[in-house]
Amino acid sequence: MFAGFASLVIRHPLSVIGMVFCALVAAALGMSQLQFDDGYEGIFSSRTPEYQRYLAFKRGFSDTSTNIAILVRSSTGFDTAALHQLQELALDVHLLDGVEAVFSLFSLQRFNTDTQELEPVFQDLEGEDLDRLIEEAAQTSFSGLSLISDDGKKTTLIVSFDDAYERLRNAQRGLDGLRQLTGAFSTATSMEAVVSGLLPIRERVVQQVRLDQPVINLLGAILGFCVSLYIFKSVWIALLNGVAPVVALVLSLGFLGLFGFNINVINTALPVLILVLASSDCTHMTYEFRNQFRAGSRAEDAIHTATTETAPACFLASITTALAFASLSFSSSPIIRELAIGGAMSVLLGLGAVLLIHPVVFLVASRFRPVGAALTRPLSADTTLKERRLLFEWLLARKTPIVACGLACGGVAVWLSLPLQTSYRFFENINPDDHLVEALAELEAFSGPMTSIEFPVAIAGRGDLLAAQQLAEIGRIHEALEEFENAAFAVTSVHTLGRFLQSQGAANSPENLNAVLEILPPQYLHRIIRQDRDGYLLSVLVPDIGSERLIALSQRLWREIERHPTSAIDIAQPTGLLSLSAERSDKLIKQLVLSFLAAALACPLLIGFWFRRVDFAVFAIIPNLLPVVMIGAWLHLSGNDLQFASALALTIAFGIAVDDSIHVFNRLDLETKRNAGRRTQEVIVAAMVRVSPALITTTVILSAGLITVLWSDMPMIEYFGLLCIATFFLALVTDVFLLPGLVSLGTGRQRKLLDRSE
């Protein structure tokens, strides 16, 4: 099949070039339609119960995901002039399109016992004792957040956008307006205003994803060229070796654009992966092109023979990598399933580019004297032929202890990796040193957490919203959660308003509660009561402490709630964005582990079927599982646990790392057919001597391409790349040092069994 394919390509190079040109035109159109997002809208959506609870919560209450925090710093504190300037800023922000409410010092209210009415705390800035007002403001809150720091030099404005701004594209205009206002404010006053919160951080992630693509892909291509130049000692060969990979990159980006795939934090490394995978396949073929040219074959014969021998391994390697991507479809997250489809199809497109373009490029270019001379020139690496042969003979002479040591290391690594837990933080996709994250941390240090675990509360039997029994029961639960585990959690509910009234010397009566509720903007009102006024919201303010701890805390809080039976109200299980992200991330990461197990099972089976050898299927398991379990052991020992980046990296890197084993098996198969009478040891040595330089080179190319992710400012992408690189190098070590011994022991065992049966 591959011999016929190679003949067809060699006989019709112009047709291949024409086909590729048409494909590149379509790809250019697709690339122009590429969109970028942060994956926030798709990563957690599903039909699962926890997501349906979250949707029900969003239909009934205001969501804080559109809230933006403005941190205002003043080195001298807030005098009358500064407060006037702050007030003007709050008014200007309120006039921006899409702004529903602005919660600031000027939103705080107090109860006038003389008039029996609410009035602003900062009603008259000129004739009041500012120190007393600021102290009163520090002790007054409807939301559980403190609006001013203890030293009186920092304050915050919480800006609530319309719910439509949850979509980042809709929020862009509002964010630009906020930045213009705060920039002008910082320039015109002695204070500094910084915009932060979920929406600005999401925007920053999208900007980084957009910036990463040209940088990472360009650096990947340059480093791939540099590695080829070093290995082949020829600018011409290095340039030719990069043509098909660049075409594969363009085709994959075009495919993603044409079929509506967005580039996001989950798949941003996919294009550079396609680039380096294609470079790896091309390098294997280039080694064989050079070997055939140096053997004196004509250009057509050299290209035909080399393509026929290497194309099957490249084909199978791409299929196993596509299988690794396809295994991600076990996920219930649409965005990860998109990665499964996009990754598998991009790998196959890359394979097509390699098999069609790479032979044609070398066939045409070899007619030019500098290229022909480079292909036939001896390389300095050839002097190591004897050393390589001695190395593999030495390894095979000690195969039993080497294999035993490998199996022991695998067993220890499995035991160490078993306690691995999942871990996820909401802002893990952005650098913690980013000024947006630092500003949010600085704000939360004095105001309290801006994230919360939500408990929707329904009124049983369609009772009165502000009836005494309902208020008493939610107040009892509220206070129990505040004292839970002696942690003094900040809790907000309708009980918070009742406490506020009592602190002002007013009665906690339905009339007074209604008066407070009526002055609240809808965005804040519906953080306390349901939009149809048939229930409340009980919020426990907690920081993003990581998915494992959040899940455990939510469960303990729920058990505490169940310890206090109620008859007038019904409290639902915890929900909200923080709870959803913790619960769904835990399940999604565990689904990725299942994806890895599926790939680990399917790839060896496919290898055995392809070569029609059960022993190859068995031999493929240990050298490729060992690097993964060793990485898993390191994750546990280092305390990093299993994150999205690590779970994705281990699954995808496994599918790629299997490629080395496939090329070893392919060369073993060829050497066995050519040298049927030779001893097994000699065949293994000959195969490893021939294939090992390409294994080392392709590992370096893969690693060089992925090391470009270190230029990204996104920790998740850096982490993904580093784990992949570590897996590739460990796989190279096991394929070079462990796999030959496994094959020798397994083949020897088979022959002994056959001899006994005869």
Image (cartoon, rainbow, N blue to C red):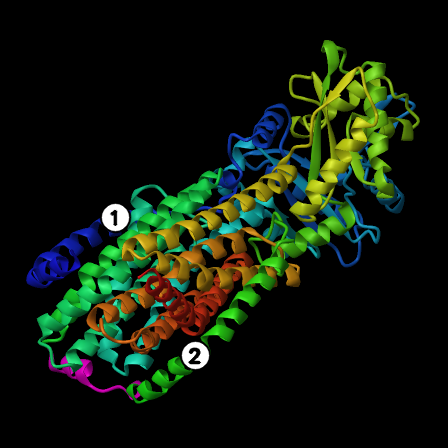
**From what the image shows, is residue 4 above or below residue 747?**
above
* Amino acid beneath label 1: Leu
**Residue 174, visible in the rendered structure:** yes
Q: Residue 172: horizontal and vertical position, in percent? A: 49, 43
Marks 1 and 2, the one that precedes in the sequence: 1
Mark 1: which secondary structure?
helix
Residue on which disc 1 sits: 29
Mark 2: which secondary structure?
helix
The quadrant of the picture occupied by the N terminus is: bottom left
Q: How many marks?
A: 2
Residue under the image location 28 percent in, 52 percent down: 348
Is 177 included in the stretch rendered in magenta?
no
* Amino acid beneath label 2: Leu
Q: Tell me: 46 left or right of 306.
A: right
Q: Residue furthest left?
A: 11
Q: Tell me: 572 left or right of 357.
A: right
Q: Residues within 10 Å of mark 1 (few under 14, many from 20)?
A: some
The quadrant of the picture occupied by the C terminus is: bottom left
Disc on res. 395: 2
Of residues 698 and 481, the one drawn nearer to the viewer in this rendering: 698
Residue under the image location 70 percent in, 43 percent down: 550
* Magenta span: 368-381
Q: Residue 341: horizontal and vertical position, in percent? A: 36, 44
